[in-house]
Amino acid sequence: MKRIAGCLALAGAVALQPACSTINPYTGEKQTSKATSGAAIGAVAGALIGIATSDNAKERKERALAGAGIGAISGGGVGYYMDVQEAKLRQKMEGAGVSVTRDGDNIILNMPGNLTFDTDSSTVKSSFRPVLDAVSEVLKEYKSTMVQVAGHTDSTGGDRYNLLLSQQRAQAVANVLSGYGVEAVRMDVVGFGETQPIASNSTASGREQNRRVELTLLPYTK
């Protein structure tokens, strides 16, 4: 599947809208949600389903999705669809060491590298496979969800090595999800190397946070 690092990096650069308070329909509690701008969501989702490239790519991708029995969600039902999915993921990821973050209509699963891989390895740890199995159960139920599988490293080592390692780790996670029944046509695999740290690389704890694989779940809409 075509790499979309450039498109996604551009989408990530779009400014976020201010946080707003909503009522969670499953808990009845007030929660603060940071809504991503429509431009950012559209750019990322468009890249994942081929819309960001050309009309022909869009048509091919949509035919592939339709062939796999995957349909788009109507605009009015997107929020509810993602809310239910988020609730199930939070339940399954409790105690697994994987954080679940809601950003507008996106759901981001942060999988720490120390749980997922051994040092300098791109083989998913056997102890982490049950976690990916649990994620796949939700993804198989919510088939109108596209998934970006993104690998990230710290700044230790050379740029090219880190980029390759991040790509290999992202692909390894995608392969496991595919083995558990998640359609490959729904996933895009990308490695960002050390270019998107979430903490300082000057400390051991910061480097540990930067070594991760992130799954970004997006609704497939038309």
Image (cartoon, helix red, strand yellow):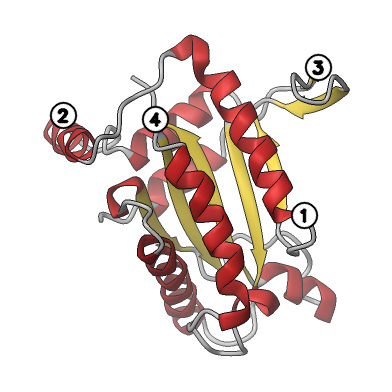
Answer few, some or many: residues within 10 Å of disc 4's Cα (few below 14, many 20 plus, some between 14 and 19): many
The disc, 2 or 4, on the residue closer to the chain's N-terminal end is 2
Location of residue 199 in the rendering, given as x and y in whole percent from the top left corner? 77, 63
- Residue type at numbered disc 2: Asp
The disc, 1 or 4, on the residue closer to the chain's N-terminal end is 1
Q: CA distance from mark 1 to mark 4?
A: 26 Å
Q: Which mark is residue 220?
A: 4
One can see residue 55 in this view: yes
- Residue type at numbered disc 4: Tyr
Q: Nearer the viewer, residue 90 or 204?
A: 90
SS at mark 4 in the image: loop
Q: CA distance from mark 2 to mark 4?
A: 17 Å
Tags 3 and 1 touching, CB below 8 Å:
no
Tags 4 and 3 touching, CB below 8 Å:
no
Which residue in the structure is indicated by mark 3?
23
Q: Nearer the viewer, residue 127 or 4?
A: 127
Query: In the picture, which quadrant includes the N terminus?
Result: bottom left
